[in-house]
Amino acid sequence: MEIGTIVTVAGRSLLALLFILAGAAKIAGPQPFLDHMAAHHIPGLLLPLVIALELGAGASLLIGWQLPFAAGALALFCVATALGFHLDLADKAERTLFIKDLAIAGALMVIAAGALAQKQV
């Protein structure tokens, strides 16, 4: 196996782990997440969809299945999370979370674009 392939799979796995563990945490104890959503005027009815996205697209990212769709969906989710939860840019911690979410979205966009480019070869 080439070093580039190993690094790509390792990077995808680390990103996937972020989402899979977040989805599992929401299942294990949903109330803090529901409270946080309510504080930002985001309907709690969206939590099951968030869990499904994090677990489903996270697993897809992990195994390399339907990468353009999984990575693209997670990238959009990260942008939505930044805009929905971390807009208090005067607060240093919130600003850091905002930029982190956008950076993760950028990495996911690179994965999605790379997967699309490979399909065209």
Image: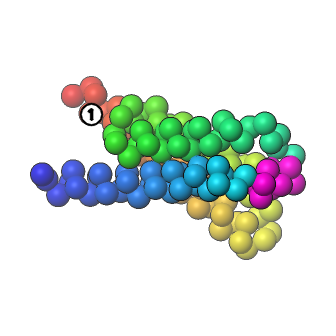
- Whether the magenta-drawn stretch holds residue 67 is answered as no
What residue appears at the point 87 percent right and 54 percent down from the top-left corner?
39
Residue at the far front in the pictured view: 28
Q: Give the magenta-colored segment's residue range.
A: 31-40
What residue appears at the point 82 percent right and 40 percent down from the top-left corner?
43
Q: Position of residue 104 (x, y in %)?
A: 52, 54
What residue appears at the point 59 percent right and 38 percent down from the top-left corner?
52
Residue at the far left in the pictured view: 1
Would residue 41 appear left or right of 13 to someone viewing this image? right
Q: Position of residue 56 (x, y in %)?
A: 50, 38
Q: Nearer the viewer, residue 61 or 33?
A: 33
Q: Position of residue 22 (x, y in %)?
A: 58, 54
Residue 27 to residue 50: above or below: below
- Whether the magenta-drawn stretch holds residue 37 is answered as yes
* The C terminus sits in image quarter: top left
Q: Nearer the viewer, residue 96 or 38?
A: 38
Q: Assess disc 1: are there few (<14), some (14-19) or many (≥20) residues with their C-alpha within 10 Å of its C-alpha.
A: few
Q: Which residue is mark 1?
A: 118
Q: Position of residue 53 (x, y in %)?
A: 57, 38
Q: How is the image coloured?
A: rainbow
Residue 115 to residue 6: above or below: above
Type of amino acid under label 1: Gln
Secondary element at image label 1? helix
Would residue 35 appear left or right of 71 to someone viewing this image? right
Q: Is residue 49 visible?
A: yes
Residue at the far bottom in the pictured view: 92
Q: Nearer the viewer, residue 50 or 72?
A: 50
Which quadrant of the figure has residue 95? bottom right
Decide whether the magenta segment is chiefly helix, strand or loop: helix
Residue 63 to residue 9: above or below: above
